[in-house]
Image: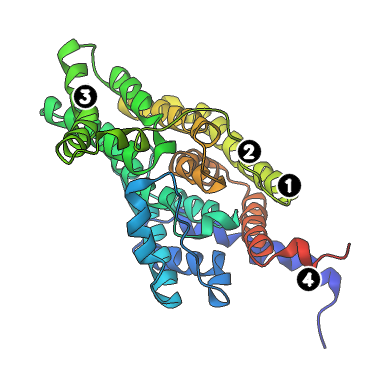
Amino acid sequence: MFPGLGYICCQLPNYLTPVVSLFKEKTTIGVFRLIILSLVVHAHFFVESPTVIIPASSVFLHDWLAVVATWPPLLLALTYHVLIIIQALRLNYILGNNKLFPHTNFTVAMAYILFTGLLPAWCNITGALLANILIIWLIHLLCKLYNTTKVGAMLFNIGFLTGISTLLYPPSYPLLLIMLLGILILRPFKINQLFTYLIGAILPFYFLGSYLYLTGDFKRIWQFIPGLHWSLPILEPKETLLGIAILLIICLLGGFLYLQSNMNKLLIIARKCWIILFLLLLFLLPGLITVPGFDWTALLIIMPAAAAIAGNLFYYNQQKIFLSILFWLFIFSAWFYSFGGWQLLPK
């Protein structure tokens, strides 16, 4: 005899509560759990493989992504999972290793994977997904900048990676300002260090201009520099964007509040790194609406900072039922949007 509805409702919290707690544990099996989570969030890959979105405005990535688009569906799905899981683990390792959390956990990696499944456009292989590799790398370098003895080399590397990121994916151009502010936050003001950063940031453009000049094609330089003007992408249906915004705001607001209440427990370097992550979240947003030729996939570049902040909500909050309900809302939302749930509803 099947249990009654009342019994199921009473027992439901017991099935839900352990989910998020599994990612708070510091165990090697956590990596396996993240792999399972990625497969669950992107379950639609079993029906339809991810596509490769080739932005016309990204000259450098255009040819490379065109080659990737010819890969078989199984390889595309595997490539996407590998990129997402490695980025999640790398971001999680950077924050844990630099003491941005009191104890090592996998909540940031969990949040990153959950966020990538929300918008169907984020479930594809895009320039933004590749740009996140460089953004996470820059977060790592900034966190190391405070205590490094090779300041000049580190600043040059930060500038150089920032310049490459801007060339590869134009909507990431605010990184040029964010990295400069991050350096000023982490290091005492020294004009020679700022020049070192600026030289590194300009060098990729210098190499590109030199190549175009020597080949007699210098007029093409403007194709590689972001042309800035207001350009708002269109998303249909709008209910999808509203649902995603509500979930993200809950996580970001909750993560911010918990971080504020526990900030005094962190080291000075950790506090400064959190400030930089907030700058990343805020200042990368204009890249979506000021660079023409890019759709909502460009918003994926804020996910490393967003997942880091949201990780505080999943780590510090002790209301297991609330966290589990929020977790499953992300899962069901990812399934609903990716499987075209709006078309299945009666009109």
Does the residue at mark 3 contact the one at mark 1 (Cβ under 8 Å)?
no
Q: Secondary structure at mark 2?
A: helix
Mark earlier in primary sequence (1, 2): 1
Circles 3 and 2: CB atoms closer than 8 Å? no
> In the picture provided, is 251 more to the left or to the right than 52?
right
Amino acid type for the residue under numbered disc 3: Tyr
Q: Where does residue 322 sit, x and y in percent of width and height?
A: 67, 50
Q: Report, in whole angstroms, how far the alpha carbon at label 1 lies from the one at label 2.
A: 17 Å
Identify residue type, mark 2: Ile
Nearer-N-terminus badge (3/2): 3
| Disc nearer the start of the sequence (4/3) | 4
**Residue 238, labelled with which disc?**
1
Res 317 seen here: yes
* Mark 1 residue crowding within 10 angstroms, few (<14) / some (14–19) / many (20+): few
Residue type (three-letter) at the residue carrying disc 1: Lys
> CA gap, disc 4 to disc 2?
31 Å
**Residue 249, disc:** 2
Q: Residues within 10 Å of mark 2 (few under 14, many from 20)?
A: few
Label 4 or label 2, whichever lies nearer to me, is 2
Q: Which mark is residue 8?
A: 4
Element at label 4? helix
Q: Residue at x 10, y 29 (%)?
A: 150
Instruction: Nearest to the eye among marks 4 and 3: give it.
Output: 3
> Seen from this angle, which residue lies furthest front?
216
| Quadrant in the picture for residue 223 | top left
User: How many residues crowd around disc 3 within 10 Å: few (fewer than 14), some, or many (20 or more)?
Assistant: many
